[in-house]
Amino acid sequence: MDIKSWLHTVLQHYQDPERTFRDVDTVLQTYLSLKPKMDTYTSNDGHTQLLLCLHGTIPITYRSIPYNIPVAFWVPREYPNSSPIPYVKPTASMLIREGRHVDKSGLCYHQYRSSWSNDQKHNLLELVAILQQVFAQEPPVYTKPNAATPTPPAIGSPQFQESLLENRNSPTQQRQNMPLINASQPKQHNFQISLPSNNISYARSTCT
């Protein structure tokens, strides 16, 4: 069964299946990185319902660099009388950046949604396009910072000498009877220091 036939089948229980099909099909043809699926949506009050979900990524350009924002658009059965429910869906390596248009759960807000009506002026495609523009100005996700590796003391410093003394006096060191490093003639040591990055980066993902 192709996508169009599948959509016609799953939308039979929607309030306006023909209008919903047209709008969803238009979005899928415009944003090829979005895919449809039927999944269980859980509302804030804990109510669950099987709804059509368009999940994947939408492309943006932020500071001249392209990114893909992972999203999910839930289409309620009352569509187009009710607005689609858009979410940002960060991957395991991402965190949500709360702002005017996205809360900590990833739910997206915009005046276009709050003033939603069932006329042709409001539709799923325009909502996706509007959020795409918003995300290009205010990216809703960022990469989790890496934990910084502690910087080892410089060879020859008082801290380094103290660490040598502690090692020499430890039972393990005494059993091994290993010679101490001469601070006046230091050996070559390679230390890897990982610092957190300030660069925002985004990755492609789907909703779960």
Image: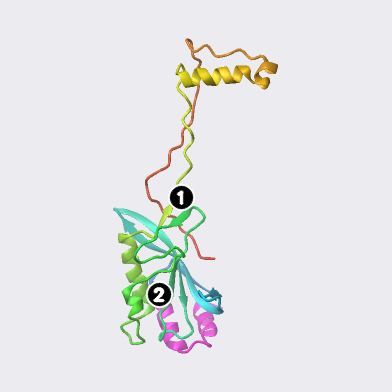
Q: Nearer the viewer, mark 2 or mark 1?
A: 1
* Number of dots carrying numbers: 2
Q: Please, which residue is most extreme toward the right here? A: 175
Tell me what residue is drawn at x 37 percent, y 47 percent. Answer: 199
Q: Nearer the viewer, residue 114 or 157?
A: 157
- Residue bearing the label numbered 1: 144
Instruction: Give x and y (percent) for residue 18.
Output: 44, 88
Tell me which amino acid carries mark 2: Val
Tell me what residue is drawn at x 49 percent, y 35 percent. Answer: 149
Which of the 4 image quadrants contains residue 177? top right
Q: Is residue 167 in the magenta section?
A: no
Q: Nearer the viewer, residue 6 or 183?
A: 183
Which of the 4 image quadrants contains residue 135? bottom left
Q: Dot 2, crowdedness within 10 Å: few (<14), some or many (≥20)?
A: many
Instruction: Give x and y (percent) for residue 194.
Output: 46, 36
Q: Quadrant of the C terminus?
A: bottom right
Residue 187's place in the image compared with 46, above or below, is above
Tell me which amino acid carries mark 1: Lys
- Quick one: SS at disc 1? loop
Residue 196's place in the image compared with 163, above or below, is below
Q: Quadrant of the N terminus?
A: bottom right
Q: Is residue 23 in the magenta section?
A: yes
- Residue bearing the label numbered 2: 27
Q: Where does the magenta region start and end?
A: 1-27
* Prevalent SS, magenta region: helix
Instruction: Give x and y (percent) for residue 85.
Output: 44, 75
Question: Which label sits on residue 91?
Answer: none
Tell me what residue is drawn at x 58 percent, y 13 percent. Answer: 180
- Quick one: SS at disc 2? helix
